[in-house]
Image: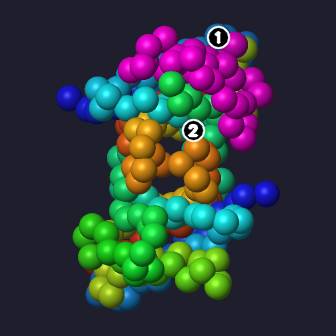
């Protein structure tokens, strides 16, 4: 069955620390991958997406993610987090454009000033 | 004005009551979705619709029904609410056509509490 897993339920970092959030997917064939962010009290927003091409994709607010096909992974990274990055982060995946989007369980990030 | 509007934003109801959550969008998107969010479980798909005459069950459709009244409107109903349907519900939209077909635009959410 298609699924998305995220390695950490809750991550706590100090400002300026580096961030890496793990995401693994279980899909056969073509896969489209996404990271969404939900800031406290707000709706989900797209952070970045991968459809094809360069496996290193850059998103908003200095975030990037790397698609590693051999590891079925799409980890999110940021070299230096800020307090304003405190949010919940969701990895999501889909196959073809007619497939539904499946979300992972989310990782809650708390950044301490 | 928000691109995807959900009403009500908050609702408290009692077990057995019928509840309708409404979603309207001004994005001009043809695809609409209902998800529920529970702590530690992420977002789970309830129902989705790729156009006005298309309705599909998602992962957790039991206890829910939907109506796609127009391209811009997609309602979620709980015929007889139960406490484990207490959750945050999100409506989302997307537009058919590669590569954006699966890029979702979310509403602000409807928090439902069933007592």
Q: Quadrant of the C terminus of chain B?
A: top right
Verify CB contact (< 8 Å) between mark 1 and mark 2: no
* SS label for mark 2: strand
- Is B107 in the magenta? no
Q: Where is residue A31 drawn, in percent x and y?
A: 58, 64
Which disc is residue B18 wearing? 1
- The local crowd at label 1, few if under 14, some if 14 to 19, many if 20 or more residues have their Cα within 10 Å, is few
Identified at 77% across, 28% down, the residue is: B62
Q: Which residue is mark 2?
A: B35
Separation of residues labelled 1 and 2 (CA atoms) = 18 Å
Query: Relative to A35, does residue B54 appear above or below in the rendering?
Result: above
Give the side of residue A51 with respect to residue A29, left or right: left
Letter of the chain that mark 2 sits on in the rendering? B
1 or 2: mark nearer the eye = 2
Query: Relative to B76, does residue B97 appear above or below in the rendering?
Result: below
* SS label for mark 1: loop
Q: Where is residue B92 drawn, in percent x and y?
A: 45, 37
Give the side of residue B90 with respect to residue A59, left or right: right
Query: Relative to A33, does residue A67 appear above or below in the rendering?
Result: below
Span of residues in magenta: B52-79
Q: Which image quadrant is residue B16 in?
A: top right
The scheme the figure's colours follow is rainbow
Letter of the chain that mark 1 sits on in the rendering? B
Q: Where is residue A95 drawn, in percent x and y?
A: 61, 56
Identified at 63% across, 40% down, the residue is: B45
């Amino acid at each position: 069955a298609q699924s998305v897993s995220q390695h950490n339920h809750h991550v706590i970092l100090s400002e300026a620390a580096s961030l890496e959030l793990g995401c693994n997917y279980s899909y056969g064939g073509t896969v489209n991958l996404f990271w969404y962010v939900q800031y406290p009290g707000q709706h989900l927003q797209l952070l970045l997406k991968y459809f094809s091409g360069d496996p290193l994709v850059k998103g908003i607010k200095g975030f990037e993610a790397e698609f590693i096909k051999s590891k079925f992974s799409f980890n999110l990274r940021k070299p230096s987090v800020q307090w304003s990055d405190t949010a919940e982060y969701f990895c999501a995946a889909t196959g073809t454009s007619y497939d539904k989007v499946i979300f992972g369980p989310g990782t809650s990030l708390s950044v301490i000033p | 004005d928000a691109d995807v509007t959900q009403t009500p934003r908050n609702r408290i109801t009692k077990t057995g009551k019928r509840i309708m959550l409404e979603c309207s969008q001004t994005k001009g998107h043809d695809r609409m979705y209902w998800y529920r969010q529970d702590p530690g479980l992420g977002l789970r798909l309830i129902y989705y619709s790729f156009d006005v005459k298309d309705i599909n069950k998602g992962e957790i459709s039991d206890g829910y029904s939907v109506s796609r009244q127009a391209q811009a409107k997609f309602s979620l109903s709980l015929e007889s609410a139960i406490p484990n349907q207490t959750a945050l519900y999100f409506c989302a939209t997307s537009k058919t056509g590669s590569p954006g077909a699966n890029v979702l635009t979310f509403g602000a959410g409807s928090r439902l509490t069933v007592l």
